[in-house]
Image (cartoon, rainbow, N blue to C red):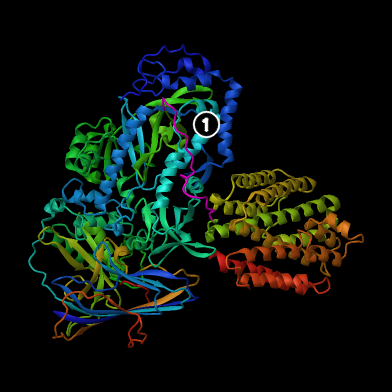
Amino acid sequence: MEPAGTETFANPPRRAVLGMDSYARLPGVPDEMLDPDGRIRPLWLPLLEHLQSLEPDKLIRALGRASQYLRDSGVFYRQYGGGTSIERPWPLSHLPVLMSETDWEAISAGLIQRAELLEMVMADLYGPNRLVAEGHLPPSLVAGNPQWLRPVVGIPPRMGHYLHFIAFEIGRGPQGKWWVLSDRTQAPSGAGYALENRVATSRAFADLYAAQNVHRLAGFFRDFRDHLIAAREDRDARIAILSPGPWNETYFEQAWIARYLGFLLVQGDDLVVENDHLMVRTISGLRPVDLLWRRMDGDYVDPLELNPASRIGTPGMVSALRSGGLTMLNALGSGALEPRAMMAFMPKLSPVLTGQPLAMPNIATWWLGGADERREVLARPERMALSRALDMGLPFDSDAPPLLAGGMQPDALANLLARAGAALVAQETVSLSTTPALIDGRIVPRPFSLRVFLARTADGWQVMPGGFARIGATEDPTALAMQRGGAAADVWIVSETEVPAVTMAPAHRGPYRRSAPATLPSRAADNLFWMGRYVERTEQITRILRARHIREAESGRGAEPLQLALDALLEDYGVTPDHPIPQGLIDTLSAAVASAGQVRDRFSTDGWSALADLEKTAKLLAGRVRSGDDAARGLSAILRKLAGFSGLVHENMYRVEGWRFLTLGRLHERALGTTASVAALTGPDAPHGGLDLCVELGDSVMIHRQRFAIATTRETVIDLLLLDPMNPRSLRYQLDQMFGQVTELPGGVMHGEYSALARAVLRCRTEIATGSPETLDSLQLSALTENISALSELLTEGYLR
Amino acid sequence: MTAYRMQIAFRYDFERPTGAGRQLFRILPATIPGTQSVQSASIRIDPDPVETREFVDFFGTRVIELVMPAGISDLELILEADVQRLAHGIGLDISAPLKRLATEIAGHRGLDARSPHHFLAATPRIPTTPEIADFAAKASHGAATAREALERIGLALHREMTFDAKATDVNTPPEEAFRLGRGVCQDFAQIMVSGLRSLGIPAAYVGGYLRTLPPPGQPRLVGADASHAWVRAWCGADAGWIDYDPTNACFALGDHIDIGFGRDYDDVAPVTGMMRLDGGQTGTHSVDIEEAPLQVQSQTPSWMPLALDLGAKARARSRRETESVAGSE
């Protein structure tokens, strides 16, 4: 089918703006914007007019708004290669792909039919296995498929269906027809990126987006979410998204979707199976999870019954499914539908199972385990690409590039097929249609494919009106893979009539009910606690280093005794001051960023940006500053950025449990740091100038001058830095605050009785509150340090295991 | 018909008290109509598990699922069972000619547990290994039927390999054990499965036990001190599955007691799962199987629901113990 809107229009003359006058179809390849006669389709005219009407600098600013949005939200994906992985900014192709509503309806109908078909195949593979018994599917193909998970054969899905959220990769072939390129039934990614593309693109072209009747995406997510919420069997139980963790290439998206839908983001470690039910470890103990949206490959979910090599699963998950104590979507084992070889059978299975031929064909595929198929490929090897039968996805996405059968010697080909046929598929090589992309100020045709998402809702399958277009980096259709430099674009489904506005807000039912803040998984609490500790530790190390550089600049070698005392403090932090900004400081900061990276679903975008920016600054300075004054100035800049981050946390973070653990981490680390520097610099054998240095490290120089007109003495320092309840840098202040926080934690006070942790904090606090400079000698201080250190253990024991 | 009284024991000691743990035990003798029946079976576990469950896995093996409480420092599991085993003779060779085997396999439609299709593909534990494939091709040279190939490969492997309980561990890949030329029953079985599959003969890995004491006048079988493993090959539509024990160079008949079979060790491992451990763990595993007088009173012919005897804490009689945890020899 040709795209709609081909009727002859008075096509306005093309202007030489953005290279539009030379935009042309590639030979033999359909284009989304141009009809077969080379005229611009009416659907695209508003966008083109808008682009051409913008002054060049305005266009650059418009595109900049989209990129800025993505940067600010920290949208990234993780790129693997050469044994390392790096976070990459999201490669947005700014021009959306436009589709008419009529075209889209046809695509949707074809994909819904395919979704129903896949559900039936799945139900058979994990149920009666009739398709194999009746000869519609080769038994060896199923038996040799590592994603056909035998332990879940015979376990019925609790919601009645196996598949709930799937995606298809589709492309338009040379005749203008749409083809399914691959089925994504395991745990498809990209829906969150599609949403981000939408927000970014609509920022770049805000006026145009508002004026066009573009179908909104929110309704699709809302209906899916509401369906899941209604499907819970236990109304108090949570819905969680199971993530492989921050090292997964699409972790960002998982965190994003979790935040968007209000589901809990969990990893295998957070979960435990107890009495047939899945529970999440939280700071208030185990809490039930009734429904798990799986975003990892099925065989990794349970090391006990599935892949024993999995380190990211939860032992007992299959057991919970077997006992019916859990709904998982998609059902375990849904990856069995994905291998390319399965596509060879879909055209035949469709009439058998649905009574209808496929409404949208998939790319022609032959599984070469069969003798007939081998003969067919040998007879006409031209335009055939050979690839691994059980691999998933698009042939040109694979690590191992496909082999062109036509390019092989006939004997070699026959040999290969005879020897390894069952491991191979042949697929007709595809060339994809093109869509306009804006590259270096010119609009040029680029091949593209679409990823379309389908979700099962209360009304059956729904297709996300839009999706995610992958745009090739060059004219070569094999360059699509994002991992190799392709880009992603938004897809606008344009209606001729006004589209309804939709929001994520659920339909109004009954009076407003305040929902209690959700309980915090222990792992998230642990990461927040340690993030707090690392950030505070960074600050302390920075202050020590700055003091050291200032002394060096002021007194040169005369400062050596003080420097030695400071070096001893640094050593406690594992920092060797061998560079103006030593690696140990960067490592501590990176540890804070890493902890934050584990809890991105609970962390504001601004907070994340501030922390990431801080790390970038520190790394930049580390390679640049010279010892002494220069370094001191650089460290001061780091301190200011740290204060900015702390301000964001303090001012903006909602006072839920997560904030408490972050705060406790900071208080605890500061309590330890202050005590350590006081102990090191106020003792009888402390170097000359130690007392003033101590006040400086405690950031209390001004207040010391105001409170004590006399010179700095051991007593004034201990009073101000340890005992003073009004000084936000003092030990007393930290312990007061900690006590307040720990009594607010679950079980902190039960019927007037304190938890073990609260009692321990109270003991430390009482000791300081009743102490005096005389009683706090170095022996006392070291005992106190130990007691404060032990608080971390108690906290871990009580909440973080 | 031989009757056996068996006692299987697992004991662990943990350096530090452990977190809670979930474990699967595949240790119960199977019920195979006409070949093996279980008269009684009971299991004692000390300390008491917090959860116990039982299910039958894809390949028909009965699995005991336990969740142990947190904070335990030792664990003991003892299975006592009475089993009857009927030794069939090996009989005439009605297996498929090797040339026709592929056609017979293709003619088998269905993916039930005993379908040959499960047992041809490589698995993580038994990958395709060219050296073993070469060995199997040479050893089976001239064999006309699948059973002949099975026996020739088994005999050749027995000559090639030396039984050595110290040379390998449970995770030694077959390729490495084959190069060493040493190993225990798991290694023998894995190498043989790999070789058979390379020839297109469907081959399963079988877990089970051997009688500890031989019948009078016969030598003691190797690998009787612990769980045992051997090979099961699909030899055509008529002959079906045939068991061969390469460690003892014999068809597995009356002296072998089946637990279950699968594609590799992971499908039949006696114990799966770990405690959440801080420290180390040591353990012992013992197997005692004695021939018992045949009982005359009426027996329940098939399996009875497993009585997990959770209360009894009485220590069992003294037994021989070997130094392998969940070991398979």
Residue drawn where x is 53% and y is 18% of the image? A52
Q: Mark 1 lies on which chain?
A: A
- Total number of numbered labels? 1
Q: Where is residue B78 in the image (x, y as percent from the top left)?
A: 33, 80
Q: Position of residue B291 (x, y in %)?
A: 20, 83
Q: Please determine whether, in this image, residue A3 is positioned above or below residue B111.
A: above
Q: Position of residue B125 (x, y in %)?
A: 33, 60
Quadrant for the C terminus of chain B in the image: bottom left
Residue drawn where x is 33% and y is 70% of the image? B53
The residue type indicated by label 1 comes to Ser
In the rendered image, is residue A761 in sight?
yes
Quadrant for the N terminus of chain B in the image: bottom left
Q: Is residue A569 magenta?
A: no
Left or right of residue B233: residue B54: right
Q: Please determine whether, in this image, residue A498 is positioned above or below residue A168.
A: above
In the rendered image, is residue A296 in sight?
no
* Relative depth, front residue between A331 and A555: A331
Q: Is mark 1 on a helix, strand or loop?
A: helix
Q: Quadrant of residue B140?
A: bottom left
* Relative depth, front residue between A506 and A764: A506
Left or right of residue A620: residue A31: left
Task: Residue at the far front: name it.
Answer: A511
Query: Callout 1: 10 Å neighbours few (<14), some, many (20+)?
Result: many
What is the magenta segment's predominant secondary structure? loop
Q: Name the residue under label 1.
A: A202
* Relative depth, front residue between A318 and B202: A318
Residues in magenta, as a range? A495-515
Q: Position of residue A751 (x, y in %)?
A: 60, 72
Q: Please determine whether, in this image, residue B220 is positioned above or below residue A544.
A: below
Residue drawn where x is 35% and y is 45% of the image? A185
Q: Is residue A510 magenta?
A: yes
